[in-house]
Amino acid sequence: MSEVFEALLRPYDERRRAELVAAYTAVEHAAEPVPEVRFPALREPALRRTVEGMLALSGRTLVRSDRTKWISGYRDDVAAELARDPACVPSVRDRAVLALVLIHSVAIPRAAGRLGDDSWLSPFPTPVDELRRRTQLPVGELDAALRRLRLAGLVSQVKAAADGKGEQGSGGFVPGPQFHRLTPAARRRLQEELILAAGPDSPLAAAIRARRRNREHDQGESER
């Protein structure tokens, strides 16, 4: 690995090199954001910029989480390019099932004030029975889609847990660890898409469509 990053690591001594490689490896391979207190190369801004440079070699970037935690994700321009390749995105059926999980685990609790505006991880699982009611997919195809989404880290399955009164809650599916890796711009885009999917006739959805039309118009004018 060091050979790939030689130009970036050359100015540093062996200890600093090891710290940089350790931080790079952690943010690339951890399932959850890693706390910067454990990695000097994430704590110190100058070293963190070098980690950014290491990630940039493969189209990646650092994503901050909870102020003092970090993980990596694709840069917005790279993600947009990958999204144009059908081989890099889930199938239409998988995306439909994922949208249902997001609506019931994130959008509805957020609208009820039970989830922060910027959170894409949720303690409110969508039960399998709810997914079966809300989709026309045969049970076997729904289960297959959930397996693929789980393997991709896009959903996680959680077991039923007892609530504060000792009563058993319902388990189900929540957004998976890949949602940690969304950049701020990607989070905003996903939030807009979720609003358009959950409430296409709402005033907020109309405002999003108008803003997008204006942005496309401005881009078209600038290219003339």
Image (tube, rainbow, N blue to C red):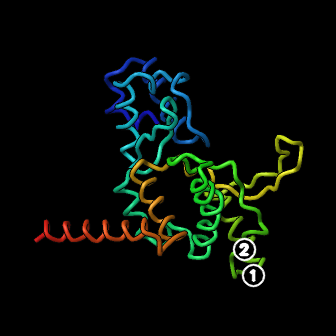
User: With 32 as the anchor, is 127 left or right in this view?
Assistant: right
Using the image as rendered, state which of residue 154 and residue 210 is in the foreground.
Answer: 210
Q: Which mark is residue 142?
A: 2
Give the residue number, with chain letter if any, for mark 1: 138
The residue located at (77%, 66%) in the rendering is: 128
Residue 175 found in image quarter: bottom right
Residue 8 relative to residue 93: left or right = left
Amino acid of disc 1: Pro
> Where is residue 161 drawn, in percent x and y?
83, 47
Within 10 Å of disc 2 (Cα), the crowding (few <14, some 14-19, many 20+) is: some
Which SS class for mark 1? Answer: loop
Residue 28, compared with residue 69, is above or below; it is: below
Q: Is residue 75 above or below residue 141?
A: above
Q: Marks 2 and 1: CB-CB under 8 Å?
A: yes
Give the CA distance from mark 2 to mark 1: 6 Å
- Residue 25 pos. (x, y %): 52, 36
Residue drawn at x 76%, y 62% is 127
